[in-house]
Image (cartoon, rainbow, N blue to C red):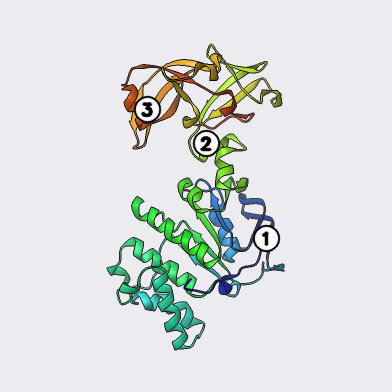
Amino acid sequence: MILEQRYFMSQKLVLENINKNFGSLVAVKNVNLEIDPGEFLCFLGPSGCGKTTLLRIITGFEQPSSGVLKYDDKVINNIIPQKRDFGIVFQSYALFPNMTVQQNVAFGLKMRKMPNKEIDGRVKEILKLVGLTEWKTHYPAQLSGGQQQRVALGRAIAIKPKVLLLDEPLSALDAKIRVRLRTVIKRLQKELGITMIYVTHDQEEALSMADRVAIMKNGEIRQIGSPWDIYKAPESSFVAGFVGTSNFIAGRKEGSSVKIDGYSFKINGLEEIKQNTVYLAIRPEKIELISDQTNMQQVEKSNIVDVIAEVITFLGAVVQITFTIDGIEMNVDITENEFERLELRRGDKIKLHFPPDKFHLYTEKPGNLT
């Protein structure tokens, strides 16, 4: 390990009934959250959901309209950003163009009047940590976007912040660089043991990096949990649609089945739903394609549907087949090997099985259903 973890040992950060209004606009609503020391938490949600406002409240750049922010059991609402010792990395790198890489990384240390010998040692460690030792004498204009973001990350870490906050730091980069930097950031977070709070609208970033994900909509946290729990057990149709891909369809409850466009699907868990209209969600990879190799003893016969392969989309290891039920466009994902074996073509008739235990049931109407 390059930097000693003890310098990064954070304390618990607690948000109690945090609200933020801009006039009549409610930006953050009744947020209660505990962030454990050394945790990687991600705020995930669409544009305008309040995630960046919440991040700015934590940094001190915005004051909450009401509520209490605590760090190490001490209320920090009135502590200015510079005194909170929280580092922040923005989407825009905000590097000094007339300073070299090592001068940019050293900037915060000089502002804290650290002795030059200690600054030199710290900067050397940081540059090695973020993989920029060979670029230390270069200026920002001579670096790629990914390298510039690593400089910004190194500058933020150099001051040994109690908490590191990142506001969509990778959104301006191309896809391959984003993937590489996700690995860099996650490795640094685990190696240093620092508490990290990350804001993004990119679900792939959130699911691949965070210990916990807080899904936000209209200023509220709609669900919080591990990436696995969020994906496997979305608590609302909004979460099911925003995280990953889901097929949504509405039907009428009839006993232990839901009637949809002439079909009657058996669905597990229907006894918990009291209303007649039921909204169903199922992931594309959970729908099964019936072939001559299918064990028909293990399928629910009433949940087999004949459809037309209207669109076939090759996605590498996965092939997505688009079909329609009850006027609703849906997708099923199959492996590339299965697709090749079946020699499927657009316009082919296929049989699909919807397993009764793979549906998520909701009483709220999904946004994509009219």
Observer able to see residue 359: no
Q: Earlier in the sequence, mark 1 or mark 2?
A: 1
Q: Is residue 103 above or below residue 9?
A: below
Q: What residue type is labelled 3?
A: Glu
Circle 1 residues within 10 Å: few <14, some 14–19, many ≥20: many
Whether residue 28 is situated above or below residue 301 in the rendered picture: below
With 100 as the anchor, is 9 left or right in this view? right
Numbered circle sitting on residue 163? none
Question: From this viewpoint, which residue is outermost toward the left?
Answer: 142
Using the image, tell me which numbered label, if any, was put on residue 338: 3
- Looking at the image, is mark 3 or mark 1 earlier in the sequence? 1
Q: Where is mark 1, residue-wise?
A: 14
Q: Position of residue 264 (x, y in %)?
A: 57, 14
Q: Label 1 near label 3: C-beta < 8 Å?
A: no
Q: Which amino acid, by three-letter code, is at mark 2?
A: Gly
Distance between mark 1 and mark 2 Cα atoms: 29 Å
Among the 4 quarters of the image, the one containing residue 170: bottom left
* Element carrying mark 1: strand
Mark 3 falls on what kind of element? helix
